[in-house]
Amino acid sequence: MRLYLVEWMESDGYDRWSEFVVSCSTPTEARNTHPDGRVNAGWDGLQVRRESWIEYAKRDQLKVTYLGRAKKDFPACVLIASYHAGDDK
């Protein structure tokens, strides 16, 4: 397994995800992962608030950075995610 940092560079304000670290096999798999752990779900419409993460069709705009390797038997999963809860008013 490899570790990737996935960032939504246009995320600002409150009630949004901004980035997460995921263990998976490829950068494409990392990009296709939602911060809540869903993979290849076409997550639009499944979110409570769609604007809380980038639209699935625009996921190629996410910045994916290789961080290193995890143990060989480490499971594919989201390790940590940053969500900015609150009210910007």
Image (tube, helix red, strand yellow):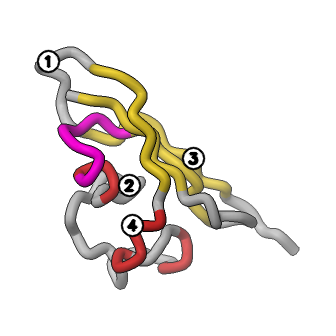
Depth check: 81 or 56 in front? Answer: 56
Residue 83 is situated, as x and y percent measured from the top left of the image, at: 59, 53
50 in the magenta segment: no
Q: Nearer the viewer, mark 2 or mark 4?
A: 4
In the depicted view, which residue is nearer to us: 86 or 78?
A: 78
Mark 2 vs mark 1, CA separation in Å = 23 Å
Could you say whether the residue bearing mark 1 is in a helix, strand or loop? loop
Residue picked out by circle 3: 82
Mark 3 secondary-structure assignment: strand
- Mark found first going from the N terminus, 2 or 1: 2
Compute the Cα span from label 4 to label 1: 27 Å
Q: Hey, what amino acid is under mark 2? A: Asp
* Residue 30 percent coordinates (x, y): 31, 49
Looking at marks 4 and 3 on the same chain, the residue that comes earlier in the sequence is marked by: 4
Q: Amino acid at mark 1?
A: Lys
Identify the residue at image location x=34%, y=56%: 31
Q: CA distance from mark 2 to mark 4?
A: 18 Å
